[in-house]
Image: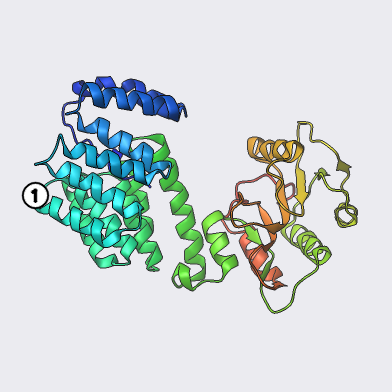
Amino acid sequence: MFTTAQFRVFAGEPEERSLSRPRHLLRDGDHTQAEAAYRAVIDAEPQLKAGWAEYFQLLRAEGRFDDALALAERATRYFEQDAFSGALTGAALVEMGRLREALGYLQASAEQDPDFGMVWHEMGYAAYRLGEHTHALLALDRAFALDPRSGTLHLRGKILRNAGHYLASEVAFTGAAEAAEFPEQRTEAERQIDTTRRYATFGGKPAELSPEQRWFGEHGSVVLSSCAADQVEDEALVMALAQVVENAGWTFTVMTTGEDWTGWDALAARLGIPRVATLHPAFGMIPLVVARRPHGSEVRWRHAVRAIEASGAGLVFVIEQPQDQPAADVVGRLTDAEGVAINLEAALEMALHPEGRLARRKLGGA
């Protein structure tokens, strides 16, 4: 979510030279040192709004909403007669779930300075969180007219997608990519374009879709089953994967897993590929990495997954996918499904979808 810190609230860029150090630290991922550097800037130059906004966004991104609100209240001492501190306070209250209270602060700030783009953006976000989508879109239109920013179009795209307006959503995300000031913004906008196109495959609003359709929409990951009254055995899901592989025309050179289970032996035999304990980079290698559940803490699993990501070749399959873990390429069932039924037709459509995560992956004969 690109919000407050995207706005240049202090016009003269030469005055922002003191922010170069915390910005570099933040970009390098050293949040602890970046926070200390932002505090030093605020103490030395309390009138520099960009310092407050960027430090606020650091706290917001880390989920430290109480600290963000405390920072906003501290800013009030320096910007008491300014819409800026009210915008920060409102933004913090939104993240704390105090939405109506937040909207009151933001509306008061907008009345105080109706030409301040940031406050309209935050008002749009608050209205979005409240489910007032028309109000949100109007506020975002005002924000973009005052200060054209990628993040405003990004939020607009999300609102339109949630309403099932996929073409309009894609237009907004395309604009966000074109307006991006930083590589991270462009990358995220392009990811959201792919997500929107996947959702559009099914029609209807995202909230009306099945869990496996939403999973594919968000992650581009294939789910072999759909919700049903009965549970399907792990062995059946493994053989369903084999059918998808065969129907898609994929071929693999090796299979690796950290688990000793007869189901994996059967899969390797059916696909005619050898099992190996560890992946070693080799020219032309197309690995199939499998597990019953993701093994985020297991070294060999992480190494194998990274090898596929780095080479762009191969596939990761898990029988059961927890909602709170990184998505595998192909999933047997989602953890919270009470029962499942194998749906090969839908799975193959996801596997071959041009916006799916496997579309640009090297998968042998595909």
Which residue lies at the image location 37% right of the left edge and 37% below the top edge?
58
* Left or right placement of residue 57 versus residue 200 in this view: left
Residue 159 in sight in this render: yes
Residue 6 in sight in this render: no
Q: Is residue 80 above or below residue 47?
A: below
Number of labelled discs? 1
Instruction: Please provide percent x and percent y for residue 324.
Output: 59, 53
The three-letter amino acid code for the residue at tag 1 is Gln
* Left or right placement of residue 305 versus residue 192 in this view: right
Instruction: Please provide percent x and percent y for residue 82.
Output: 11, 41
* Left or right placement of residue 187 versus residue 302 in this view: left
Which residue lies at the image location 49% right of the left edge and 63% below the top edge?
199
Quarter holding residue 37: top left
Q: Is residue 17 above or below residue 329?
A: above
Quarter holding residue 22: top left
Which residue lies at the image location 64% right of the left edge and 35% below the top edge?
310
Instruction: Please provide percent x and percent y for residue 214.
Output: 54, 64
Question: Mark 1 — residue?
Answer: 112
Q: Is residue 64 above or below residue 45?
A: below
* Left or right placement of residue 200 versus residue 316 in this view: left
